[in-house]
Structures are given as structure tokens and as C-alpha cells.
Image (cartoon, rainbow, N blue to C red):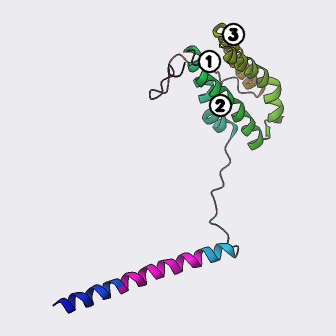
């Protein structure tokens, strides 16, 4: 009986080793094909619109800056104002022209200075300065929308948090 169990165990081990060797060989072929310049699987051809990027990258940051500033959470507001600036820069690279306008130029002429003012107020921990600068930033957003014939897109200061899972009081 012991001999039969030993033979079955060796047979199972042999099958396992053959399976492992097969998997390793297949992996080796895959990496060899990649090394030989085999094309990767095609990626979906997705080109986000300006509206997509504004809704997913800019608007939430504007909202979070407003919420953090209202709570005088300067550490978080610092993070979000930097993220907002970076979002506009990424959008200008992704969509260089919008409605016949140079996106980077729009950001530079319409949005940069209001962002700078919000950032300065945050750095100074100037509550009144923040409130004034945030209103000016919001107005700049709406003015930019108007120049792009999107006057129906009206941004405002948040009246409540759409982020029930985030504490804007923390980190003051």
C-alpha cells in the first residue's frame, strides 16, 4: 500500500511539475514576443471633451477648495489649489484648442491670476482674503464659460458637500 501511495504521489508531483513548466514556457514565449516588438493590445480610442475634463478634473477641485476654505482648512486648501492649477495645465496639454481658442492662453488670461490670489490667501491663512479671492475665481470661471459660448454653465460656491465621506474640518 505504501508503494502505491508513493507512486501516486510521484505521479502527481510529475504532473504538477509539467504544468508549472508549461506555464513558465508560455510566459517565456509571451515575454519573448514582447521583446521582439509584438504590438501590445490596442487601447480604446477615447478623447475626452472639454466638458468631460471640466466636470471630472476642475469642478470637483473648485468645490473642494471652497469647502476647505470655508472650514479654514488651509493644509487641504493648499493641496487642492495646487491640484486645480495642475488640472488646468493638463487640460491645456490634452485639448490645446477649444472653440477656436488656445486653451493655455485662456487659462493664462482668465484663470491664472484668480488662482494666484486664492493661493496667496491660503498661504497667508487670510480668511477674508480667501473669501474674496474665491468669489473672484468663481466669477472668472463663469466669465471664461461666457467667452466660450457656454454661459449656461454657471459655477457657484458650494452650499453643501457632495462628499459625505470626506471631512473638510480635519487638518486645520
Sort mark 1 into few (<14), some (14-19) or many (20+) by Cα contacts within 10 Å.
some
Instruction: Say which residue appears at 61% left-offset and 19% top-offset.
Output: 74
Q: Which residue is mark 3?
A: 129
Question: How many numbered marks appear?
Answer: 3
Instruction: Say which residue appears at 77% left-offset and 38% top-offset.
Output: 92
Residue 1 x/y as whole percent: 15, 90
Label 2 or label 3, whichever lies nearer to me, is 3
* Sequence-wise first label, 2 or 3: 2
Give the alpha-carbon distance from disc 2 to disc 1, as whole Å. Answer: 13 Å
Q: Which residue is mark 1?
A: 156
Sort mark 3 into few (<14), some (14-19) or many (20+) by Cα contacts within 10 Å.
some
Rendered-image quadrant of the C terminus: top right
Answer left or right for 141 relative to 100.
Answer: left
Tag of residue 29: none
Residue 25 x/y as whole percent: 53, 81
Label 2 or label 1, whichever lies nearer to me, is 2
Label 1 or label 3, whichever lies nearer to me, is 3
Task: Look at the image and tell me whether residue 65 can be seen.
Answer: no
| Residue 67, above or below 36 | above
Indicate yes or no whether the magenta region holds residue 20.
yes
Tag of residue 58: 2
Answer left or right for 153 relative to 160.
Answer: right
In the image, the segment drawn in magenta is 14-30
Does dot 2 land on a helix, a strand or a loop?
helix
Q: Please tell me which residue lies in front, 124 or 97.
A: 124
Instruction: Say which residue appears at 68% left-offset and 41% top-offset.
Output: 49
Amino acid at each position: 500500500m505504501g508503494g502505491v501511495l508513493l507512486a501516486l504521489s510521484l505521479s502527481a508531483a510529475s504532473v504538477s511539475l509539467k504544468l508549472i513548466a508549461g506555464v513558465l514556457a508560455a510566459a517565456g514565449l509571451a515575454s519573448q514576443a514582447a521583446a521582439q516588438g509584438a504590438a501590445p493590445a490596442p487601447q480604446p480610442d477615447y478623447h475626452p471633451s472639454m466638458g468631460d475634463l471640466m466636470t471630472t478634473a476642475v469642478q470637483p477641485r473648485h468645490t473642494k477648495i471652497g469647502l476647505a476654505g470655508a472650514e479654514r482648512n488651509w493644509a487641504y486648501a493648499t493641496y487642492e489649489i495646487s491640484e486645480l492649477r495642475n488640472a488646468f495645465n493638463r487640460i491645456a496639454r490634452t485639448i490645446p484648442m477649444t472653440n477656436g481658442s488656445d486653451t493655455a492662453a485662456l487659462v493664462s488670461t482668465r484663470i491664472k491670476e484668480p488662482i494666484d490670489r486664492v493661493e496667496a490667501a491660503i498661504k497667508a491663512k487670510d480668511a477674508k482674503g480667501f473669501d474674496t479671492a474665491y468669489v473672484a475665481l468663481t466669477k472668472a470661471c463663469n466669465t471664461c464659460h461666457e467667452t466660450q459660448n457656454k454661459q449656461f454653465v454657471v459655477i457657484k460656491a458650494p452650499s453643501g458637500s457632495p462628499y459625505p465621506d470626506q471631512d473638510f474640518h480635519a487638518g486645520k
